[in-house]
Each structure stands twice: as C-alpha cells, then as structure tokens.
C-alpha cells in the first residue's frame, strides 16, 4: 500500500458524509485510480467528494505524479511550467493577508510531509486506535495533512465528532465546538494563535490541547501546550530582530520547495526561511507567536501589532471576531482601524467604551466598523479582503468616533 496507508485492510479508514471505507477498499481504489495520460500535473479540485479527493491525491503520490490540491485543470495548466523541479504536491492557498482573488501554489515534496508524521504523533499523543475528526475542507493544507496523518497512523478519519477521540481545528472552529457534547477529549489546534480564554474553556472541559505553529510554506515549525511553543523536532529556529519585532526564521526538512504566484516566503543562503511572522521569547527554549510582520502598524511613532489588539478586543463581551488594520494618515503615519463582528445583543458604543478603558492609547482604534468578518477557506479572518474594502470605502459608514481629542 501507499506510504500513507498503514492501517489493517479490514480496519476503518475513512468516514465522510456517512460513507465508511476500509483500508483495503481504499488501497484498492488508489491502485485502480485512473490518472490523466502523461506525466503532467494532475488537478484535484476543491469541492471533490472527500473519499474521491483522498483517493486521487494518494494515487498521485503513490505513482510519482505531481498533484495540484484545490485547483482545476485550468489552474494546473496555468502553473505547471512554473513549479520547482521535484514538486509532488502543489497546494493552492490564499493567506489571510492576501487581497481578494489572490492565490498562490505552495510546492513541496511528499517526503517533506512524511518526515513530520512520527514527530506529530508523539507530540500530540495520538495512536492508531484513535478516531480523528477534521473540521475543514480537504483542499486546505492543514486539513489535508490531518487526514493523511491519520491514515499514516492507521487510524480512522472523518468529518463527524461523534465517536471521535481527536479533533483537528482552527481556534475559531474550536470555539464554535467547545460546548458540544460530542467534543473529543483531545484537540490539535493550528491556523492562528489560540487565545487564553479559549484555552481556559478547553481546560475546563478536560480537553487536552496540542497547539502548533506552521505555515503552508514552512509546514511544522513549533508546537506546545498552554501558549508556549518550542521548536518542532527537526526544526532550527532563529528570532531575528527587525523594525517590527523579532521575525521567526526556520530551517528544517519540512520546508516547501517554493511558491508560485507570490506570497510571503523568503529564504536566506543558509537554508532558513520565513513568512514574516513575529515571535517573542519566553525563555531559552520557548516562544510565542505575536503576529505577522505585515500586520504591524506604525502610528505616531509607535509600532502596534494587529494581533495583540485583536486579542484584547476579542476578550471584550459581545465581540465575536475582530480584525485590526492600518490606514494611511497624514499626521499619524497610519491610523489604527478596527473591524468588529458583534453578537446580536451587544451595543457597539459599549464595546468602544470598554476598549478605551482597557487598551493602551497607542493601540486604541481611531476608527471602528461593525461588520461581518470574512474568512479564508481555512477559517482565518481575511485581513487582505478587509484592507481592500477599507481602501475602497465599501465597509460602510464608520461608527461615530470616540471624542478623545485624538486626530480622526
């Protein structure tokens, strides 16, 4: 069977949408899968039935055919000639900072994902007798990896929480599931920083949470519990000073080969790479992620990290989601702008008053918009879309400014 299929032939492999597939059945389907003629890039479009999706991806990896995850035949034709030599997996992705319609393809080898399988299993404490739930579409890299990792373990994987012992989720998704009676006893959380309140709610439910930091371009970089992260096994980390803070660089066998279509990936001559995320050390071995460097706002000479302000806003009663962005300003350089999504019972003025009491002056937003927060396919707030909407004036009217005497 495939390098990713390590379960017993009569053991349950997949349980998506009510379909149950045994390992033997999946292995036979992978072996029998019909691929396009030639040796070119094979498209595996978003929206494909999960069982068919995994069968096609596994068939390509098993036969050494490069596969485009999340793209159609036209996408494959468009990017095929630009992919780095040795590409086996190309994953279409759009980051939270990307503008509307922007997509890039992250190219990597199969081995770069396989190499991280055993370390993740050990760190998260998951085994072949676990039943694993994924909570997002399989064309998103973190969910595809979660499904492949379950198959590598010989475990069962599906999209239902009933009977699951482990769930892979973004913090946003976990927050929506946290009161579910069917919530598994273990969670693997990635895709964004997990806030303290959510961490406390999970602990109160007795859920063992493993957090990891990574990116589609870097794969695994760090993992840990309780908000403190340490380098993932096999990863060397350097925190390099920049004007915005300490930028995280990583060197490991898990890095992507490259990116087609732009993106944040940068490399140096020593094999380290970064996507611009910032971190701050906790001690000699541990650190925490504080945000993306391109989300830093320079206002009145101070550097404000958007994610720090967002975390403070999310702690306010009634705030469901928050995105903070910088807007050019003649006097301040940039002005801090908040876009908040509120529950139906909360008054925006009360939220702003609470923010004034709890945020330092430099972090206090000067303009506020109450608006539903758009999200990327992986569940992250779509910061880039909101930047575009702010610049175009399509967010609607700003809430009346607070009368604090500051420039507006």
Image (cartoon, grey):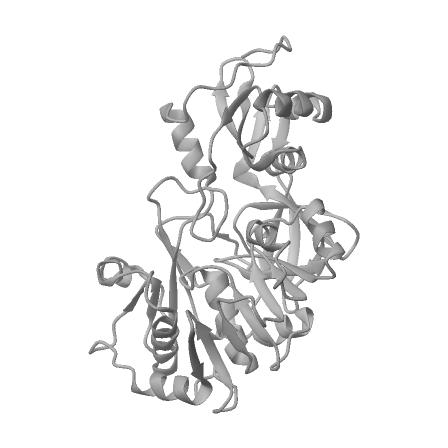
Height in image: 146 above or below 279?
Answer: below
Q: Residue furthest left?
A: 37
What percent of the width, then of the height, locates residue 289? 65, 48
What percent of the width, then of the height, locates residue 397? 43, 19
What percent of the width, then of the height, locates residue 20? 44, 79
Q: Which one is in front, 324 or 354?
A: 354
Residue 309 appears left or right of 66 = right
**Count of all numbered marks drawn on residues in the image:** 0
Height in image: 178 above or below 122?
Answer: above
What percent of the width, then of the height, locates residue 335? 54, 21
Q: Residue sitting at 38 percent across and 23 percent down? A: 393
Q: Residue sitting at 55 percent across and 14 percent down? A: 401
Displayed quadrant of residue 188: bottom right
Q: Residue furthest right?
A: 283
Q: Quadrant of the N terminus?
A: bottom left
Height in image: 324 above or below 73?
Answer: above
Q: Residue sitting at 53 percent across and 23 percent down? A: 368
Q: Which one is in front, 224 or 246?
A: 224
Residue 248 appears left or right of 52 = right
Q: Residue sitting at 43 percent across and 90 percent down? A: 24
Q: Is residue 351 visible?
A: yes
Residue 314 appears left or right of 253 = right
Q: Is residue 112 visible?
A: no
Q: Which one is in front, 108 or 20?
A: 20
Height in image: 202 above or below 343?
Answer: below
């Amino acid at each position: 069977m495939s390098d990713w299929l390590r379960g017993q032939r009569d053991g349950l492999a997949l349980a998506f949408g009510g379909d149950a597939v045994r390992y033997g059945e999946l292995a036979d389907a992978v072996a029998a899968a019909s691929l396009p003629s030639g040796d070119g890039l094979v498209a595996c479009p978003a929206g494909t039935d999960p069982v068919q999706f995994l069968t096609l991806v596994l068939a390509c990896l098993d036969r050494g055919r490069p596969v485009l995850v999340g793209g159609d035949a036209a996408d494959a034709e468009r990017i095929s000639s630009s992919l780095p030599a040795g590409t086996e997996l190309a994953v279409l992705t759009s980051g939270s900072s990307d503008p509307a319609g922007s997509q890039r393809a992250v190219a990597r080898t199969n081995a770069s994902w396989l190499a991280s399988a055993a370390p993740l299993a050990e760190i998260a404490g998951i085994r072949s007798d676990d039943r694993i739930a994924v909570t997002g579409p399989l064309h998103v890299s973190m969910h595809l990896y979660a499904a492949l990792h379950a198959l590598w373990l010989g475990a069962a994987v599906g999209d239902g929480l009933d009977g699951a012992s482990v769930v892979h989720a973004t913090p946003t998704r976990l927050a929506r599931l946290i009161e579910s009676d069917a919530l598994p006893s273990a969670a693997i959380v990635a895709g964004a920083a997990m806030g303290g309140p959510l961490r406390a709610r999970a602990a109160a439910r007795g859920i063992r949470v493993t957090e990891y930091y990574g990116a589609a371009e870097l794969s695994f970089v760090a993992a840990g519990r309780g908000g403190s992260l340490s380098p993932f096994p096999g990863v060397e980390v350097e925190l390099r000073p920049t004007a915005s803070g300490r930028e995280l660089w990583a060197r490991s066998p898990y890095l992507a080969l490259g990116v087609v279509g732009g993106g944040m990936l940068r490399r140096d001559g020593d094999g380290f790479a970064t996507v611009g995320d910032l971190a701050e050390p906790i001690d000699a071995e541990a650190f925490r992620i504080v945000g993306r460097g391109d989300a830093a706002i320079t206002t009145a000479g101070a550097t404000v990290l958007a994610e720090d302000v967002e975390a403070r806003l999310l702690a306010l009663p009634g705030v469901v989601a928050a995105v903070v962005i910088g807007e050019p300003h003649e006097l301040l350089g940039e002005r801090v702008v908040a876009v908040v999504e509120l529950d139906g019972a909360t008054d925006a003025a009360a939220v702003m008053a609470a923010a004034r009491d709890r945020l330092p002056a430099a972090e206090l937003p000067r303009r506020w918009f109450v608006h539903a927060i758009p999200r990327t396919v992986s569940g992250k707030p779509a910061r880039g879309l909101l930047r575009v909407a702010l610049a175009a004036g399509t967010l609607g009217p700003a809430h009346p400014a607070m009368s604090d005497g500051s420039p507006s």
